[in-house]
């Protein structure tokens, strides 16, 4: 008994010392304890042996923090977010780090046809529907399925008619932090009635760290020769246009700010970058979509996905009204989103990759954010 007691004391000391040596302070999970619509709110922490940490809440199945190392050995939280559940519930911006659905991005006039039935959704973005409606997946409390030190699985059942969408949709998301500093996001969904689905994660990144200032000095490469131009209400015109000789040419890495203020109609309309790229890839293959680099810290984020498109968004509508985890306002163009997805308005554009999901099919998607350091 004495030997066991001594062993436990030594073990507790080792654990305590390990915790004290952590090079940064993660969010206390108790700040997310609470309840919403009868469901418990939680914060989960994933770690690997390289001191990388990812924190995720089941409110919106959203990423809260991503701590990664820079070339000087210091760590920064490169994902914008808040330090408590209450902050998320009361924020003006509701998409930070969340899983977006049922349909990420815009659907023209909130209307589409499925099996001869005309579906009308809420119009929550001017004359269009965006991100699944006013009460999309980002505002739902997801159910806990399982977790380990580096993996978390959450699920959500979207009932038939939820936000106007047909079919009861069961969706699972798995977050996995690997030993090579990659955050893998796997989603799978089934339906009992033909519907449409477009899921993405809406993380806002600043590789210098949240609240560190502009993201326009980040260098971006996008593996895309084409993009989908928009009309005056930000719905794709249906054209698949070449990026060559436009501000959307990221085939060679360039600063985000290098062309963002060019007098180009698409940039003016979106108040910056807010556009879908047609990725160079074979259908459903996992391929390299983009690389984002912050030159001072040396942090690099590579994006891989099975999705056919990626929305580049330079946080054009953040106005500083939300305060982030470190007490600094979250401002315009101080972060960037690389949202892997199907194309906007695909249900109304027959030549776009289909977003229709039938009862005998399974929707599956994988996106990987892999972090490294460039010396």
Image: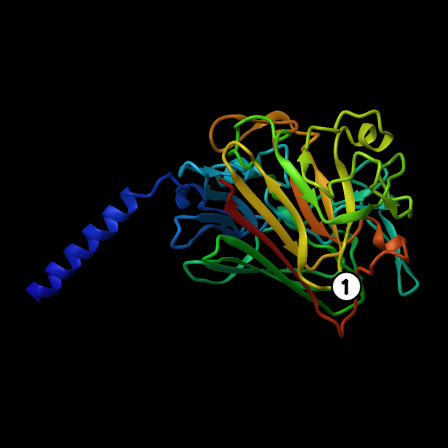
Q: Nearer the viewer, residue 173 or 85?
A: 173
SS at circle 1: loop
Which coloring applies here? rainbow
Looking at the image, how many numbered discs can be counted on the residues? 1
Percent from the top left, x then y, of residue 322? 58, 29
Quarter of the rendering occupied by the N terminus = bottom left
Q: Nearer the viewer, residue 289 or 37?
A: 289
**Residue that protrudes farthest toward the left in the picture:** 2
Residue at (48, 38) in percent of width and height = 77
Residue 108 relative to residue 97: left or right: right
Q: Residue at x 52, y 40 (%)?
A: 299
Q: Nearer the viewer, residue 194 or 62?
A: 62
Q: Residue at x 69, y 28 (%)?
A: 257
Residue 182 screen position, x and y as percent: 52, 54
Would residue 138 be found to the left or right of residue 134 on screen? left
Residue toward you, 20 or 142: 20
Whole-percent x, y for residue 71 in the image: 45, 38
Q: In the image, residue 213 lies at what x, y percent?
A: 56, 26
Look at the picture and state if 196 lies above or below 63.
below
Give the vertical position of 361 relative to 235 (above or below): below
Task: Kindly indicate the quadrant of the structure image that contains residue 243.
Answer: top right
Q: Quadrant of residue 11?
A: bottom left
How many residues crowd mark 1 within 10 Å: few (<14), some (14–19), many (20+)? few
Q: Is residue 196 left or right of residue 146?
A: right
To which residue does mark 1 refer? 283
Above or below, 114 against 246 in this view is below
- Give the left or right position of residue 2, taking residue 240 as reference: left
């Amino acid at each position: 008994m004495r030997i066991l007691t001594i062993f436990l004391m030594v073990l507790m000391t080792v654990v305590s010392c390990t915790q004290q040596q952590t090079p940064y302070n993660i969010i206390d999970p108790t700040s997310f304890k609470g309840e919403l619509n009868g469901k418990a709110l939680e914060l989960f922490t994933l770690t690997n042996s390289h001191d990388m940490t990812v924190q995720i809440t089941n409110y919106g199945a959203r990423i809260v923090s991503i701590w990664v190392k820079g070339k000087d050995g210091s760590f920064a939280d490169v994902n914008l977010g808040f330090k408590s559940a209450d902050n998320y519930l009361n924020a003006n911006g509701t998409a930070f780090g969340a899983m977006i659905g049922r349909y990420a991005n815009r659907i023209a006039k909130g209307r589409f046809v499925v099996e001869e039935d005309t579906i009308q959704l809420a119009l929550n973005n001017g004359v269009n529907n965006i991100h699944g409606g006013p009460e999309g997946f980002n505002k739902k409390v997801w159910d806990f399925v399982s977790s380990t030190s580096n993996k978390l699985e959450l699920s959500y059942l979207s009932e038939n008619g939820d936000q106007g969408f047909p079919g009861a949709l069961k969706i699972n998301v798995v977050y996995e932090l690997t030993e090579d500093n990659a955050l893998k996001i796997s989603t799978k969904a089934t339906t009992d009635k033909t519907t449409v689905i477009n899921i993405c994660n809406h993380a806002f990144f600043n590789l210098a760290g949240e609240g560190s200032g502009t993201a326009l000095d980040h260098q971006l490469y996008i593996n895309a020769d084409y993009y989908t131009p928009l009309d005056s209400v930000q719905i794709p015109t249906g054209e698949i246009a070449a990026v060559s000789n436009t501000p959307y040419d990221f085939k060679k890495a360039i600063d985000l700010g290098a062309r963002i203020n060019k007098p180009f109609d698409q940039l003016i309309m979106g108040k910056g970058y807010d556009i879908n790229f047609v990725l160079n890839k074979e259908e459903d293959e996992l391929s390299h979509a983009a690389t984002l680099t912050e030159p001072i810290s040396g942090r690099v984020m590579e994006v891989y996905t099975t999705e056919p498109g990626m929305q580049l968004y330079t946080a054009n509508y953040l106005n500083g009204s939300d305060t982030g985890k470190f007490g600094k306002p979250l401002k315009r163009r101080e972060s960037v989103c690389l949202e892997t997805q199907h194309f906007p308005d695909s249900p109304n554009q027959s030549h776009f990759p289909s977003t229709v999901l039938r009862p005998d099919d399974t929707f599956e998607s994988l996106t990987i954010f892999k972090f490294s350091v460039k010396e």
